[in-house]
Amino acid sequence: MDIFYGFDLGDAESAIAKLDRTKDTVPEILSVQEAKSFITAYALSKGGKLIIGEGACYEPQATSRKLRFKSRFLTSSDAARDIRSFAGGVLGELYLNGDLIRGEDDCFYIGCPAGWNKGTREEYREIFEEVGYPPAKIVSESRAALVSACQSKHLQVGYDILSRPVLVVDIGSSTTDFAYITSGKEEELQTGGEVFLGGGIMDEILLDEAVSASFEEKRIRKILSESEAWKSYCEFSARRLKEKYFSDEEFWQTNDCVSSVTIRYNVLPAKLTLRMNTDIADKLLNKKVDKLGGRSFKEVFVDSLQ
Ligand SMILES: Nc1ncnc2c1ncn2[C@@H]1O[C@H](COP(=O)(O)OP(=O)(O)OP(=O)(O)O)[C@@H](O)[C@H]1O
Ligand SMILES: [Mg+2]
């Protein structure tokens, strides 16, 4: 076999790499919906058309819109259906773009959080098989990150791994994974895979702060509790604002970092202003949240690390 695909299906974003051993020495990152890294989302339009990626987040005619479903795989049976729809949409794109060719001898390596056990990995693999993927193997994401680091021309990790212990920390949107490698061998580690520690928690806090500060708080809370599609949309907007802020924290010390969302759920639209500043940045790290068992992002992260 000469053709290999790597599928990093993240809770937030996904990417696909292809390695054709007859031609390449390093994997090529494929574009899906014209993006090397595309949003893990799908929507069904009014006519029943399946849309994946960023377009799904903004599709105004969406009858359903699903984001961040991978993080629910361990806890909700709906998540498997969502992964199936999204994975199916991605497969369709790969065929359409000619990046994947029917009947070719190839296989897929698909990442999963290191905390998932054997049974869960098998259930996950079956989803891809059912959708019609070529033979698939499930590998841990932190391990995949390490392989990538080993290949990097800038880091001399390949050499370091043989001589020193290495800890790989992969902070995702839904999980935080650790892989510990000594003498070139990965050691079993208690991972953050089973606690819901990821950047998505911060998006939820940011959104909650914005809703609390809104003079339409009650109405917006009601909409978000009724409409999964609008909740996803608002969380996605919060995430983009968070990334914008942390990409240039210094600049935002003296400038307003805001974005607004117009929620068209009822006849009367509701306007929500999302805001980032040092106070809110502090809350993203230190606010205690139910999802983390009443602890903060920072507390859980430090505990996992220790
Ligand atoms: N510049 C940035 N500043 C702060 N956070 C960022 C920045 N860029 C990305 N993030 C956040 O990092 C988190 C991880 O993103 P990533 O795309 O790696 O997750 P994922 O791989 O989809 O999730 P998972 O691995 O849990 O399935 C997200 O919450 C994202 O918003
Ligand atoms: Mg990831």
Image (spheres, rainbow, N blue to C red):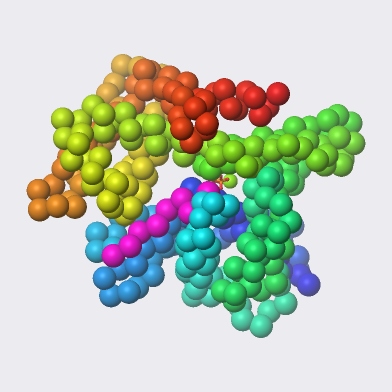
Can residue 141 be seen here? no
Q: Which residues are magenta?
A: 63-71
Residue lying farthest to the left in this orientation: 268
**Residue 212 at x, y percent in the picture:** 26, 29
Residue plotted at (13% across, 47% down) = 269
The C terminus sits in image quarter: top right
In the rendered structure, does residue 259 fall within the stretch colored magenta?
A: no
Residue plotted at (66% across, 57% down) = 120
Q: In front here: 97 or 133?
A: 133
Asked whether, in this view, residue 117 is left or right of residue 246, the answer is right
Q: Quadrant of residue 207?
A: top left
In the rendered structure, does residue 64 fall within the stretch colored magenta?
A: yes
Residue plotted at (47% across, 61% down) = 78
**Residue 71 at x, y percent in the picture:** 53, 49
Q: Quadrant of residue 176?
A: top right
Can residue 81 be seen here? yes
Residue plotted at (28% across, 45% down) = 224
Asked whether, in this view, residue 220 is left or right of residue 129, the answer is left
Asked whether, in this view, residue 299 is left or right of residue 118, the answer is left
Q: Quadrant of residue 34?
A: bottom left
Asked whether, in this view, residue 243 is left or right of residue 182, the answer is left
The N terminus sits in image quarter: bottom right
Q: How many marks?
A: 0
**Residue 295 at x, y percent in the picture:** 52, 25
Residue lying farthest to the bottom in this orientation: 103
Q: In front here: 96 or 185?
A: 185
**Residue 113 at x, y percent in the picture:** 64, 47
